[in-house]
Image (cartoon, rainbow, N blue to C red):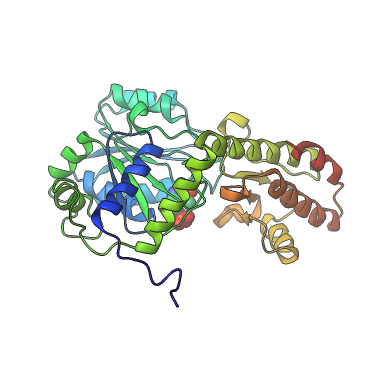
Amino acid sequence: MTHPFLDLAPMDASRFASIEDRVARLLSTSQDVVIMQGEALLPLEGAIRGTAGPGTTALNVITGPYGQTFGDWLRDCGATVIDLAVPFHTAVTAGQIREAFAGHPEIDFVSLVHAEAATGNTNPVAEIGEVVRAHGALFYLDAVASIGAEPVLPDAWGVDLCVIGAQKAMGGPAGVSAVSVSERAWTRMAANPRAPRRSYLSLLDWKERWIDGGRRALLHAPAQLEMEALDACVARIEAEGLETVMARHASAAAATRAGAVALGGGLEPYVHEARDAAPVATTLRTPAGVVAAEVVAKALAEDPTLPLAAGGGALAKEMIRVNHYGTGADPETVRRCLTALGAVLTESGAAVDIEGVDRVTEF
Ligand SMILES: *Cc1c(COP(=O)(O)O)cnc(C)c1O
């Protein structure tokens, strides 16, 4: 008997290339798209190590935990790093990027996370892209948490390296990921003696041996099951319509913000302004004296299927994450999450209005 996961026909180069093309269409890009055979951290790290070196001056924007990691990689590459950290309850502005360039005209690389599932904010990439382009810097974007939940337009925004993964709003697999690479970024890598070569981290290997060879021979056996899942999840997005998928995420985020306020009990949206809040996931602040990680643990003990998490590290005390993405970007998921949080808060003596949640999550 054939097994649905195990007895797959081998994936050939033309099928692999067609999945790359499908992902390129999702990004509305005419740049090269490379599908990397690993979780999104692989192209995120590979793109930094490929383009940054001792001659690089990088503006690294920190709006959550990933920005911290990018700064560490950049420093490890020998780059001079200017960190621009903004509080997690807000987004960075194009004005702050402009000021950073004014203070350090030598900046030639900008790293930014589009949306942060871990902190619930989203940054105005289109406006920031204009500033970055005006200064001729290379623009690196982590769009893992934004793709599928809100527009991601590397060509229109002048993004040179745009990394995506399928495991969040796309509702797909975590084991493969993709990066779009501009001509400028390829040129920077080719000129970088420290860019990984003959390495799993190497984007240049894919450029030289895959793309420049006309995409006829793969570098190694692809992660076939994950590639099939990636193709299937993009097909599912195409069938529903990307606009519809994004609208579902926006509605889920709006309902979570409104529902938390209606619920009361001291819960409030962690990100102050709705325009700075990511459609992919909504973060909530617990009232003083209520430990977010404990509330989440109690809610999950009742229903382990809820997409709830506490913030990472020090944020575990005060931040609840409602991960309403993928198939979870629907009113029923939001309602179940908020109702469960309300039940836990009630137990600890808070006054909550569960019916208030029902009123605002019927969208
Ligand atoms: C989720 C996410 C990633 C991928 O990280 P995982 O922890 O493996 O899910 C990368 N960048 C951002 C901004 C993310 O939200």
Name the residue at 74% across, 44% down.
Answer: 267
Quadrant of the image containing the C terminus: top right
Nearer to the camera, 303 or 298: 303
Q: Is residue 171 visible in this depiction of the protein?
A: yes
Residue 281: x and y in percent read 59, 45
Residue lying at the far bottom of the rendered structure = 1
Q: Seen from this angle, which residue lies furthest front?
A: 1
Nearest the viewer among 242 and 116 is 242
Q: Identify the residue at image location x=75%, y=40%.
A: 361
Horizontal and vertical percent for residue 97? Answer: 39, 28
Residue closest to the eye, 140 or 170: 170
The quarter holding residue 5 reads bottom left
Pinpoint residue 225: horizontal percent, then vertical percent: 39, 63
Measuring 59% from the left and 34% from the top, which residue is drawn there?
247
Instruction: Mark yes or no: residue 75 visible.
Output: no
Residue 337 placement (x, y as % from top left): 72, 51
Quarter of the image holding residue 268? top right
Q: Quadrant of the N terminus?
A: bottom left
Q: Is residue 304 left or right of residue 98?
A: right
Please state the total of marks drawn on the protein image.
Answer: 0
Which residue is depicted at the point 69% across and 41% down?
256
* 354 sits left or right of 119 in the view: right
